Amino acid sequence: MNLNRIMRKLQRAIVSNGFVISLDTTQFYSEDQKRMITMYILSIKAYENTRKGWRDTRYEILRTASQVDIIKCLSDIWASIRERNGQINAE
């Protein structure tokens, strides 16, 4: 199974439990490595009370070039949600 598919599956599982987590990508050219680098940004949407009232805000959880780090973070979030909901089976 490829890493993109694992990331999307974990993201869908988390979103299905009511936690809206965005997984965004951005690219830049690295002069040192002479290639394009893809950055992955994991963020959550929250409402913030400001002087002008409530507004949407994005809080960045993780920014990395490693898909494995994103998968580990999503896996930790998913485990926390399952634990909170009492869905952990004896493993």
Image (spheres, grey):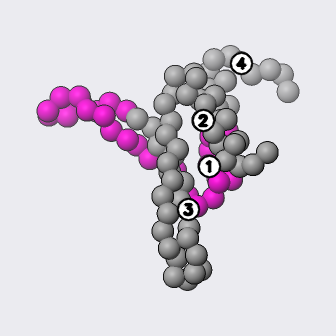
Callout 4: SS: loop
- The Cα–Cα distance between marks 3 and 4, rounded to whole angstroms, is 34 Å
Closer to the chain start, of discs 2 and 3, is: 2
Q: Do the residues labelled 2 and 1 touch (CB within 8 Å)?
A: no
Give me the residue at 51% from left, 53% from top. Answer: 25
Circle nearer the viewer, 4 or 2: 2
Closer to the chain start, of discs 3 and 1, is: 3
Q: Which amino acid type is shown beneath numbered disc 2? A: Gln
Tell me, yes or no, whether the highlighted magenta stretch contains residue 68: yes
Please state which of residues 62 and 34 is positioned toward the viewer in this rendering. Answer: 34
**Image-quadrant location for residue 85:** top right
Report which residue position mark 3 lands on. Answer: 38
Q: Pick out the residue farthest to the right.
A: 91
- Using the image, tell me which numbered label, if any, was put on residue 70: 1
User: Which quadrant is the C terminus positioned in?
Assistant: top right
Answer with left or right where residue 61 lies relative to residue 10.
Answer: left
Q: Is residue 63 above or below residue 18?
A: below
Give me the residue at 52% from left, 22% from top. Answer: 18
Residue 20 lies, in percent from the top left, at 49, 31
Callout 2: SS: helix
- Using the image, tell me which numbered label, if any, was put on residue 87: 4
Report which residue position mark 2 lands on. Answer: 11
- The Cα–Cα distance between marks 3 and 1, rounded to whole angstroms, is 13 Å
Closer to the chain start, of discs 4 and 2, is: 2
Closer to the chain start, of discs 2 and 1, is: 2
Viewer can see residue 86: yes
Residue 56 lies, in percent from the top left, at 31, 34
Q: Do the residues labelled 1 and 4 touch (CB within 8 Å)?
A: no
Answer with left or right where residue 68 lies relative to residue 44.
Answer: right
Circle nearer the viewer, 3 or 4: 3
Residue 50 lies, in percent from the top left, at 20, 34
